[in-house]
Image (spheres, rainbow, N blue to C red):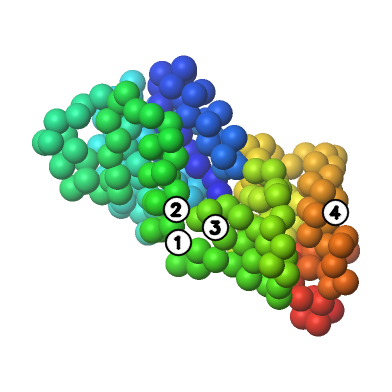
Amino acid sequence: MRILVVEDERKIADFVARGLESAGYAVDTAESGGMALDMSHAAEYDLLILDMMLPDMDGLAVIEKLRNRKSSPPVLVLSARGTVDDRVKGLEVGADDYLVKPFAFVELLARVRALMRRGQATPERLQVGDLVLDCIRRKVTRDGEPIELAPKEFSILEYLMRNRGRPLSRTMIVEHVWDMDYDGLTNIVDVYIRHLRSKIDDRFPVKMIHTMRGIGYMVDVPERAA
């Protein structure tokens, strides 16, 4: 899942970005409304976290411009403006949630996860064969046995399982899971896939993670993968 944090106060932006990355999300940051609109046009984001007071335009204007597009991600507003009128105005313009500064990161994370669930048509529990991923509790089991995954491992597996049967290139995986562009040289995806295989496939006779030669990787049951 990829999130854009729009905040001109660098300390706050870094604090939020680091926390979300630790929770397994890929995070980009923008320091102005114009930059946020350009970035949301160039890339597909699952959520925007938006400050109301930006140097070039009001956060409400950013929301209005986003909502004029054919499709736009959910928006969580962060603002020092905490009156009822401010919150109502933000929600009426099109914000999906409103959190007043200062805030506890645990509450921000809970709201992020709630908006992700609300904005997705995809199920909250993914299953391929006996491999089960709980998107809400962020737990994975194989044949009923719990499997501990690091945040990036979980994000890669979730992305693969949400696209069951569809080969995903290394470029697609990097751009979705990491805040970086694939340079054609990095083996970071292959390294993480090896880690996933060691936890998900090595101890089981049926293999779920498949290498698609010349393309990338795919999760599916063997009959369909063949």
**Whole-percent x, y for residue 133 in the image:** 62, 62
The residue nearer to you, when weighing 165 against 203, is: 203
- Cα–Cα gap, marks 2 and 3: 10 Å
Where on the picture, by quarter, is residue 221? Answer: bottom right
**Residue wearing tag 1:** 120
Could you say which disc has been placed on residue 135 in the image?
3
**Whole-percent x, y for residue 177 in the image:** 64, 46
Instruction: Give the foreground label among 2 and 4.
Output: 4
SS at mark 1? loop
**Identity, as a three-letter code, of the amino acid under mark 2:** Met
Q: Earlier in the sequence, mark 1 or mark 3?
A: 1
- Cα–Cα gap, marks 1 and 4: 30 Å
Image: 132 above or below 16: below
For image coordinates 12% across by 36% down, the residue present is 84
**Identity, as a three-letter code, of the amino acid under mark 3:** Cys
- Cα–Cα gap, marks 2 and 4: 29 Å
**Identity, as a three-letter code, of the amino acid under mark 4:** Ser
- Cα–Cα gap, marks 2 and 1: 6 Å
Evaluate if marks 4 and 3 touch, with contact meaning CB atoms under 8 Å apart.
Answer: no
Could you say which disc has been placed on residue 205 in the image?
none
SS at mark 2? helix
**Residue wearing tag 2:** 116
- Cα–Cα gap, marks 4 and 3: 21 Å
**Whole-percent x, y for residue 222 in the image:** 82, 77
Q: Earlier in the sequence, mark 1 or mark 4?
A: 1
**Residue wearing tag 4:** 198
Residue 34 appears in the figure:
no
